[in-house]
Image (cartoon, helix red, strand yellow):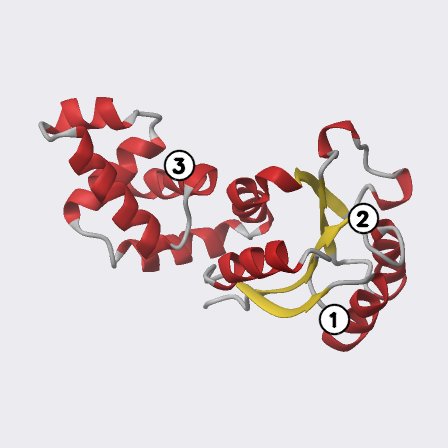
Amino acid sequence: MSLLPLRCLLVEDQLMIQQLLAAMLRRHPALDVVACASTAAEAIAACAEQQPDLLILDIALPDADGLHVARSVQKSRPEAKVIILSSYASSLERPADLRDMVVALVDKARAYQDLLAVIEQLLPEQERIDRGEKTLDILTEREHEILRLLGLGHSNRAIAERLGISVRTVETHRRNISSKLGVSGAALIHQATLLGQELA
């Protein structure tokens, strides 16, 4: 039985970043981006209306600290999870009162690379397996093999040598895999590891 996608609210005041992240998140089959907001007030109103399961929350908003949004949501929807976006993520700590709610602090400069990998950890194991099996159906046999080798930690050059093809051909296959799965960078490697376990 398939599980319902996570209802996701994206809160980011820089419009270009918001649009890029929203486009990426909407390609993820286990996410439903129910709303985007640019201010704390908009975010709180959207949470009340949409009841999201996951907030991806910029900590620096024009009208209030992003943590104000998290605390407001915590009162009405304590089971919701929060991923904080910040340019200073490496120096931040999760507030004690939000420790169970805030599941990750992601550097805004690396959000496009790291966000999906963090979200994968929130998905139930069966959802990952079901989605993995469904996704693998769209890959060719060669793409399956390259994905498995990526998941085992092999570099493009090592994969090329192992399969007797050029590095450029591996890079082309990797781009095709990224396009089909809707992920790239660290998120692709993370998903390759998960899916590679199913292929083993």
Q: Quadrant of residue 76?
A: bottom right
For mark 2, what is the residue? Answer: 60
Location of the C terminus (image quadrant): top left
Q: In x, y percent, where is residue 131?
A: 41, 57
Q: Nearer the viewer, residue 7 or 194?
A: 7
Q: Nearer the viewer, residue 186 or 99?
A: 186
Q: Nearer the viewer, residue 176 or 124?
A: 176
Secondary structure under badge 2?
Answer: loop
Q: Is residue 200 visible?
A: no
Q: CA distance from mark 3 to mark 1?
A: 32 Å
Secondary structure under badge 1?
Answer: loop
Q: Which mark is residue 193?
A: 3
Circle 2: residue type: Ala
Q: CA distance from mark 3 to mark 2?
A: 33 Å
Q: Earlier in the sequence, mark 3 or mark 2?
A: 2
For mark 1, what is the residue? Answer: 51
Q: Earlier in the sequence, mark 2 or mark 1?
A: 1
